[in-house]
Image (cartoon, grey):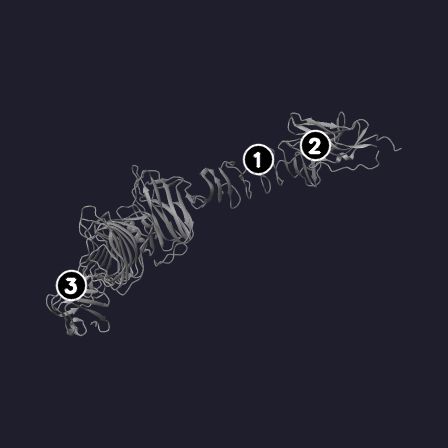
Amino acid sequence: MTDQPWIVGEGFAGAVTQLFEAGNTVINSDGVFIYNGSPGPGNPPIAYMATPTTTTDQFGNALPTAGGGVVTVAPGSSFAELVDGSVAAGLLGATPSVLNAIMGVGLDGSGQALELFSGEVGAGVASLAILGDSASGSPGLTVVSGADGSTYDTERLTLQTTGALTVDSTSPVTLFTFPVAIGTYAYLLEVPMLGTGTAIPQIRFSSAAAAVSEMQGETVLNGGTAGGYTAYQTALNTFGPVGPGLVNGDANSLNGGGIFEVTTPGTIAIEMNASTAAACCTIPVGARMHLLPVLGAAGGGGGGGGGGGGSFGNLVFLAPTGDMTGARDAAAINAVYTAGKIPVLTPGQWYIECGQIVYNSNTVPFYLYACGNATVINAVGAGDVFRVYQTDVSGGVAGGGIIGDPVIDGTSTTGNSAAVHVGDIFQFQCDITPRNFTAGTTSKCAWFDNQYRFTEQLHGLIKATNGTQLVVFDHNDVSGSSTGSFDRLLLKILATTAGAGPPVVFQNGAFAEDYDLGIYGNDVYGATMHYVLDLLGNDSAGYSRLSGAGVLNIGMELRNPGSGVQPGTINFETAGSNVIAGATGVIDFSANDTFASANNARNSFQFDGPIFGDTELWRTAGGTAPFNAGSGLASGGTINTVADVVTIDPTSNLTGMIMQKWPVGMGAPTKTTVINGSDTFSVTMAAAGTSNVAGGTSISIAPDSAVTFWWNQFTSLWTAGA
Amino acid sequence: MPSMQVSPQATVQLNGSGNGQCSINPPSGTLWQLALASVSIPNAILIPKAYLYLGSSSGPLTLIDSTYLGNSASSGKVAGAPFYHGTYLWAVWTGGDAGALATLQAYGIQVTRYRQTAP
């Protein structure tokens, strides 16, 4: 036998423990027990968590069943309470408590999972916030505004009536009240109405304290049943355009929406009243108003005046009213201008009565924004859809424009009309898609018209389709000091004629210098003759023209459907007066079918650039000889000097001849060569003061010879070359 | 005193409640000086508690060690007592898988002629 002592090794890991004691805490198979003092008989635990069947601790002490403890899990219960004092018998009972929380909907019969109070809970004390209000169908957080009983669902951003309201007198009944901060809000009304009273229900926004600078949108009353409500609505304060029109529907309800801007925080109320002291209607529980603060800012700037500051500023987003008479949309837009704001026409079908929107301000530029071709403006009646001008003969405010390329459709016009009639504004921008202005003999897709001053630096893109005239530059003097100037024009025109009329017209002395004009598109044979570019008429200061240097690009394609009248390229109505001079660019009429050649091009056209598709339009700079005066000249006649080379075939000796000075607006000539094609007769100039030739009668062009004349800008005389 | 390394073992199939027990003891004329005893149940799903006892052929008598990990555990507390012939080492399992095979195995030295004194 060994004498060595037994050495005990390490035992099992995770040895089975039946009882754990740590100070005044005992853990055993029945639960956890906390004692005040040493555990033992006569000292029951002050707190415990035990199995439901355990009624005593290991020492036989009865477990406490209520109150005084810190944490209890009472036998048979399935919840815990944190209490300050005695445990309430109920969950949301009358016992005062800081917070009673229940988990699970409907345990107290209210259908509300959690309510928060500002003070003690008691009978008649309304909660401030409700989470999970199954009774009202709102699972989210609901805040009670308290003033009128309506609730504000912060999750759905919805005000909702919680009791039925009777509207049967002229005294307003409040549906909703809500506080508003500075900002812009979108709203939507869903107000069902019961009853078929004879009085007319009226609804209004009442801002007792808040300052609402602007309101827009509409409220529509649907009343299709017997005794249905007569259309009516009204607005208080300066809420802007709220039209009176209503649309009959199938149910008695009042629906509406829009936006409003608050500049001073306060409270706004939605009120209803009867038009007379008679039965009107009842608003049941559940009438709603959705209220959405619109975040973000797009405002400031832009010259509309007023507004701004944390909201949309000067921009006012409008939705079409659907009124096909064109009155309401026009009124809404005009109201925006009246408020010093800028309208943004959101996508949809708009109707504007011609002649209703006339904007004349020398200090605030006109702006209209659209959402591309998704904004469709239907012109109704006859006249100008947008008449925009200034009367300040010495210069008003620059800028402004129609921006965003709206469609302006003249299909519904009934007489002479124009999508836009703009003039006397400096640097106006015009991006539009006008179409179908053919109802009148002078209808136009776009009409730029100088009446008081001029319209220089006009710029933009016009996509014009089907007009009696598509784009017209005009001069109709009213002030007595206006000019036909469209100088520094930067405009691209995409024209689709549909055979109706000319794409571009300069008339009544309208002209442009230093311009960049592009005319592109598709033409087709029409019922009457027309030209791609018309230069027509004159005013007291001169003829319609494109002169004084500029870039003229034309690219038109013609389609011959097999009938109709062949259109022409360019019409110089008066040769030598209605002119294109000093221009460069590319002119192409050669695509597809052939245009008729230009009218009166000779002596009217000076163009340095490629030209295709016209036998009368010649590139004049660079040595070509476009002009042949032929044998028609007589003594004392004028020799054309617009072309680089002029050929004369006299049938007798010509004397007293005049070398033409260039027409006003054509700039200064450089040189021209006159060829005497006769082998017999000479051509002799008049005196210098008459002939504009230095040397006067001493200058003669012998038969079968040529003389090149150089323009002396310092003497304003032609000088014969050696 | 001749001695040799031994690792005796015993196995029991747990009953329908997952309980069972088995024992080992040294042969006649020998003494076990055990260093370790292990309990194991391969592929156990329910993890049983296991207890080691000193006892007799009639059953366990004195608790040596216990564990909540009765499917795989070992204890050195068996080194605290000599196992003469007639002294049994019992392992008891509770709460295991019904029908599972539970094994008790010990490791130590078996001594023979331990009663003889040195010549």
Residue type for callout 3: Ala
Q: Position of residue A101 (x, y in %)?
A: 54, 40
Q: Position of residue A568 (x, y in %)?
A: 20, 53
Q: Residue at x 83, y 35 (%)?
A: A2
Residue type for callout 2: Val
- Tag of residue B39: 2
Q: Chain of mark 2?
A: B
Q: For the residue labelled by badge 1, is the local secondary structure a helix, a strand or a loop?
A: loop
Drawn side of residue A300 relative to residue A121, left or right: left
Which callout, 1 or 3, points to the residue nearer the camera? 3
Which of the two labelled residues, at mark 1 and mark 3, occupies the earlier sequence position? Answer: 1
Inter-mark Cα distance, 1 to 3:
114 Å
Q: Chain of mark 1?
A: A
Q: Is residue A118 above or below residue A389?
A: above
Inter-mark Cα distance, 3 to 2:
128 Å
Q: Is residue A515 visible?
A: yes
The residue identified by callout 3 is A629
The residue identified by callout 1 is A78
Between residues A705 and A115, which one lies in front from this camera angle? Answer: A705
Between residues A621 and A285, which one lies in front from this camera angle? Answer: A621
Which callout, 3 or 2, points to the residue nearer the camera? 3
- Tag of residue B82: none
Q: Residue at x 34, y 43 (%)?
A: A169
Q: Position of residue A637 (x, y in %)?
A: 13, 67
